Amino acid sequence: MMSGNIHGLSWFPNFPDKFVSWGQEINLYEVRSKDDAPQKSRLPYISVNYLANESRYQYARCVAASYHSHQPIIAVGLADGKIGICNFRDTYDSSWEYTPRQQRMCTCLAWNELDANILAIGHDRHRSDSCITIWDTERGVPKETANFFGQAESANSLCWDRNHRMLIAGMSQKMIKLFDLRQNNATCQSIQTKTVQGLSVAPNGNDLCSYVDSIIMLWDVRSIKQPLRQIQSSRNHLQIAWCPTRNSLLSSLQRDSSYITLYDIRTVENENSREIYHVKRQISPFPAKYHHSGKFASVNCLSWHSRDFERALLLADAVNILDFRLPATLHTAHSNRRKLPLLMQRQLYAPASPTSTTATPTQQPTSSCSLNSAGSSLDYSGPGSHSALNVDFLVPELFELDLVDETRQRALEDYGIKPDNKRFAELHLTPYLRNVWATLNNVYCDDQLSGLKSALGINLGHTSEALMASSRIESQQLQWPDGINNSNKLLCYKSEQRDHALQLCGWTFEHELERFIDQLYASKEYSRAAMICVFHLKIMHACNILSSAADNMRDPSMYRITVIALSSFNADRCSSTSRNQRSSANMQIQDPHLRAIFSFLTMEKDNFEAVLKEDGVSLSDRMAFACKYLSETKLTDYVKQQIQAAIECGDLNGLLLTGESLDGISILQSYMDTSFDVQTVALVAINYFRQEHFTDKRIQYWIASYLDYLNSWGLWEKRAELDIKIEGIRSSARSSRTVYLSCNFCGKAVSNALLDEPRPRSTTTSTNRLSSCPSCRKPLPRCSLCLMHMGTMINMSNGETPSTTPEVQGWQTKPFSKWFSWCQTCRHGGHTEHIMQWFKQNSECPVSSCNCRCFDMDGSKPNTLRDIS
């Protein structure tokens, strides 16, 4: 097994299924193909076979995979300057080791792509030795002076020109030098610059990149006198590399970041000049479920595959190795009619083999939960997948809709500015988005998006919220109505929390059910109205609804057949064979609500799985059904299962369950990855994420991106409206407290005034101020147990010398045990510590003349009181 941290990794250019990792050990792995027999992998996140280990060189400073095609070979640079060539075999060849004349650290290595035996070595500075060595491994250890360059300098990075035998070196933190080695007397050209790290030549052979700290510089190798473009970042770079399968894609890893930054370098060629610009984007290579799990905190190293399109190896947290593919990339361009054609960067579907039949991809709406987030998921496909995608990542609607034009039109119509406005229903939205906003408006109450998970008290532990959510749950056995022969027992569960959850799902109480059904009928949701009636065992009402609806349908056959089946339904009259036939027939029903009706009526022994897995029924209806018929354990498991499914497929309806939480943000991220709809994601966050989660970096990034869109379209007023709304959220989070203690005599605030008081100069004045009202100087109430005025320093009550430390002087630093606490009925109280101690043994008020049983007003029991002193 692998031990210790990994410092780096690299694919072998001419062995597409092999890669090497190094650190405390140097290991050679082979990625398994899909045809290999399944067996346990040595690495947890990528299916590999462990091939070999190099034990001679430990704690390698740098490693470079060669371009040899007959066997995998690496060069290893050590901290003492020694260089070793390794082919992962047991044989040892001393001619494959080189030691410099002066011992110092090896800083960089670079194999020549045109001649696989040529290796460039870079060392740290030494006043009497060269920092660059050219080693021809076939001719043995370098000895000729023509192989040494850079006397009394240091080499920071090395790379070879792809077209000629020319070495490019970043040296001494201040210059880039080009050594032309095509002749015996090498010529040198130098450029003064501090961007000497990470030298790399693009696949086109013309563009060169380098960096220092947070600056990336682009150069033209053919004319390197002046840089083509400078790219400034907010963080320091850790590594930059060109994608070998894309001429213009430059990747960057930044320090302490879990994102990959991609720069798509674009070129505009003129007659006498060449203009360079770039398009920047950041992607997270990890699934959304890992974003806040702490499993992957940063990306440390990246190695592009030399053949597979946009495929790379990633090193996360110096421990985990991942195989990752970039999501499908689209080139976009505006036509004269402002439409946005989508130009594919690569093919979407794998070409069909001659022996296989070609299947047409199933068309799915953008809101479907079957979409896969290629931008935020790990790709475990083997090398045999080549450049085609293995999932239907893009849906056909993307080719029909102009996303930018649609987004701009929605912005002009005040989309998401006032989601509770009646005019919001007039917007041209998809049924999916309309349902999502309606669900969020229904769940949002008391200035918070609570969600069913918190409303039902799931995963709240033993907190006060859990105690409030754990009210008594009553179970009641329901009787099947006349005409329905079903011997299965039907239990219905009720509690205050479940009733509240039903309201959040859009359902109503029993006495308001008829009005709710009439509203559904008026909105022509006939089958849904019938389904809810059946779930409430109102079978005849459902038959009447379907019969009336059939008169208004062009093809009423399905509704009429359903009415006939319901009116004489017998669930007991079925053997195992007929039960299977009924299940098969049920799957042929097109309407999901009608399928749910018969799945409910044919359920066996409280097994509602068929209803709960009916994806055609909305999540809110399925959750309402679960709250009505599932036990506490099954309901908890179902809620967790649906949350995880919503995160994986990016279904915004999952916010009904999570509310404002980290899981809710993960759902938004996953939806963003699948739909590219930054407008909806940003507006949902602005309208419904008001608490501490609003400051999450992902939410702030979405909002900033959408505001940039509004600026680019010149919609300044729309941008200003959002700015005002955002500032209102931020100011409300910083608002001062509105609950405070007031004096019985003057009615002014006691606690706020004491906080504003300057530090007292003496202990005497401090004592007076703490035990009396700061405004009228009247004494504060006494503690009913110790009889000291509230605010009196406790150490002075024992006759001790008063302390002048800031902890005692500052009112705001008093511990909770010294705070005010009083009964809401008799108004008697005292120090919290004393009151808690008293009620551990008593239930009546500590004041002798008061008969109030203060503690009986509280729901807690005496043995549950904790020591809070």
Image (spheres, rainbow, N blue to C red):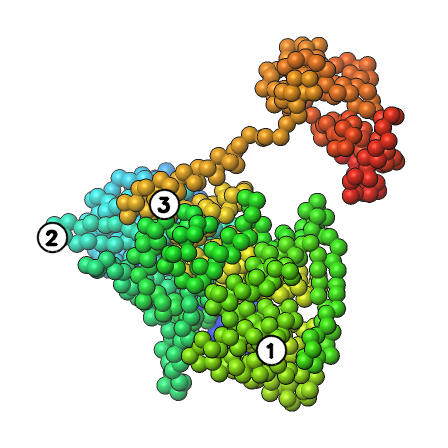
- Give the amino acid at mark 1: Phe
Vertical placement of residue 343 versus 748, above or below = below
Residue drawn where x is 53% and y is 53% of the image:
442
Mark 3 or mark 2: which comes first in sequence?
Answer: 2
Position of residue 489 measured from the top left corner of the image (x, y, whole percent): 74, 74
Mark number displayed over residue 598: 1
Q: CA distance from mark 1 to mark 3?
A: 49 Å
Instruction: Judge depth for marks 1 and 2 and give the one in front.
Output: 1
Q: Which image quadrant is residue 170 in?
A: top left
Q: Which-is-in-front pick, marks 3 and 2?
A: 3
* Labelled pair 3, 2 in contact (Cβ < 8 Å): no
Quick one: label 1 or label 2, which is nearer the N terminus?
2
Check disc 3 and report the residue beneath it: 707
Query: What number of labels is visible?
Result: 3
Query: Real-space Cα distance between discs 1 and 2?
Result: 73 Å
Q: Position of residue 348 (x, y in %)?
A: 36, 70
Whether residue 73 can be seen here: no
- Which residue, given by chain and number where applicable, does mark 2 sit on? 271
Cα–Cα span, label 3 and label 2: 37 Å
Element on which disc 2 rests: loop
Pick whichever, 162 or 794, lies toward us. Answer: 794
Counting from the top left corner in percent of width and height, residue 545 is at: 54, 73
Residue in front for this viewpoint, 559 or 696 = 559
Looking at the image, which residue is at 44% across and 40% down?
726
394 vs 657, left or right, is left
Above or below, 786 against 420 in this view is above
Relative image position of residue 12 (x, y in whole percent): 41, 64
